Amino acid sequence: MKTQFVSDTLGLAAQRKVSLAGWIANRRRMGKVIFLEICDSTGSIQAVFDKKESGHEQFELAKRIPPESAVEISGDLVERHDGSKEILAKNIKIVGLADLQISPRPRSDFDVFNEKIANQLLSYRHLYLRNKKIMAILRFRSLVMGIVREWFAANKFLEFDAPILTPTPLYDGSTAIPVEVHGDSVYLTQCAGFYLEAAVHAFERIYNMGPSFRGEESRSKRHLMEYWHIKAELAWGDREDIIKLVEDIIIYTTDECQKRGKDILSTINTELCTDGLKVPYPRITYEDAIRHLSKNGFSDAQFGQSLSSAEEEKLSKMFDSPFWIVGIPRSVEPFPYSIDPSDQRITMVADLIASNGYGELLGVAEKIFDPDMLDERLKEKGKSEESRYQFVKDVHHAGCVPHIAFGMGVERLIRWLLNIPHVRDAIPFPRVVRRRIGP
C-alpha cells in the first residue's frame, strides 16, 4: 500500500533518499538530462535523470516512457535555488505503460472549458478526470457537499435517504424518465419531496442529498438529465422561515469555501463568487418581473409562464446579489405547493436567482397541509384519479402540519460559486440531453 505521497515528499528535508509512486504528467529533455514531472493525487514534483548519475540504462528508460504512464522512482531529494524541491532520480520502474494516444493529454495544461474540445473531454471523461483543473473542481464539489452537511448537522437536521425508483413523478410525466422493474412501470426520481414530506412528520427536520433525473429537452448551460439535489423539509414553518434558512446556508457555504478552498481556486484559476454574503437578498414579485421584462425587450413574457434563462439573466442585471422571485403562478408550479390565500393565482413559492446571469439556483415553498387544498390541486393538475398518489394523500389525512421545503441543484451552486461556464463541468460524469450516455 502506498504510504508516501508527493505532498509528503515536498514537506521533507532535503538531502535524503526518497521513493515515490505516481504518473508522468510531462517529460522534456535537455541534452543528457531528462526532466519528468511526477504527479499523484496530492500534487507534482520534478524528477531529474542525469545520464552521468543514473546510468545509461535508466536514462534511456526515462527517455522513452510516454507521459501518463504509471511509474515508481527513487533518488535523492534536493532543494533547488528557488527553494522548491526536486528528485535527483537514480531508478525508475514502469508500473503501467500508457500506450493509448489521446490529445490533449489528460494531465497536460489546457483550457478545460474550451467549447472546441468539449466533445473530446466528454467522450473521454474517464481519462480527463486526471486533469488537475477537473480534479480541483471535483474537490470543490466534495468540499461544498461536506460544508452543507456540516450546516445541517449543526442545525439538528437528520439526513434521510429517499428512493431513486418511484411511482410518482412530481412534474409532468413527459419529463420523467421511465424504467421497468420486474414488469412494474416506474420512474427515476425527479425529486425526493414526497418521501421527505412523509418523513418530516416523524423527524421534523430532515434533508436529502442524492441524484434526480429529468428528461426534458433543454440544452441550456444549467441543465443536466442527471444531477444532484440538496433537498430539505421542516415541520411548523412558513415561507419566511425557509427563505431565511436558505440565506443562512448560502452564507455559511460561501464563507467556509473562502476559508478552505484557496488552493482549489488557484488551481482552477478563478475567484470565488461572494455575492451570496450580501444578505438579506432583494425580492421582486413574479408579476413585477414580467412587467420589467415586457418593457425591456421581452415582449413574449406573459403571466403564467416559466421564466427562460435569458429572462432570468436580464433580471439579474437589476441586482448585485442573488435575488428572490416570489409569488410564482399556480399554473407553473406542481401541485404540492400551497396557494397564496391573498391571491389565488399564485403559490407560496419563491425562486432564488443567482447573480451574474447564472440563473435559478433553487426554489423554496410552503407545502400544502390541508387535504382539501391538496385534492383541489391534484384535480387541477389532472392527477386526482391516479392511485399512485394515494400515499401522498394518506400523509395529509394523518395529522399533517404546516411544513416548508427547499430544493437546490448541487451543480448549479458549484457553477455559480466557481464562475464556470456549464453545469456539466461540475459533475464527474455528465449526462446531457441528446448525447449518448457514455462512458
Image (tube, helix red, strand yellow):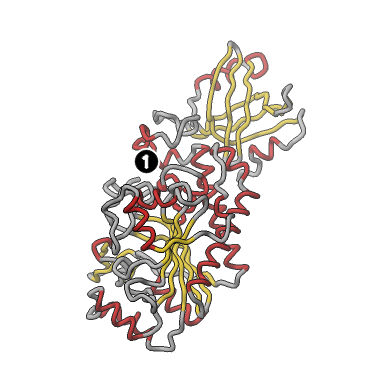
Q: Around disc 1, counting alpha carbons within 10 Å, would you say few (fewer than 14), some (14 to 19), or many (20 or more)? A: many
- Would you say 86 lies left or right of 337 here? right
Image location (x, y in percent) of residue 324? 46, 61
Q: Residue at x 23, y 62 (%)?
A: 174
- Relative to 344, say whether 9 is above or below: above
Quarter of the figure that contains the C terminus: top left
- Would you say 33 lies left or right of 401 here? right
Name which residue type carries label 1.
Leu
- Would you say 16 lies left or right of 128 here? right
Q: Residue at x 48, y 78 (%)?
A: 200
- Relative to 399, say whether 127 is above or below: above
Task: Work out whether residue 303 or residue 139 is closer to the camera in this orientation and state it.
Answer: 303
- Would you say 323 lies left or right of 433 here? right
Question: Which type of secondary structure does the marked residue at label 1 adopt?
Answer: helix
Q: Which residue is mark 1?
A: 122
Residue that extends furthest to the top in the rendered view of this protein: 31
Tell me where residue 367 sits by quadrant.
bottom left
Image location (x, y in percent) of residue 1? 60, 46
Image location (x, y in percent) of residue 11? 72, 37
Residue 319 seen in render: yes
Residue that extends furthest to the front in the rendered view of this protein: 295
Image location (x, y in percent) of residue 346? 35, 71
Residue 427 seen in render: no
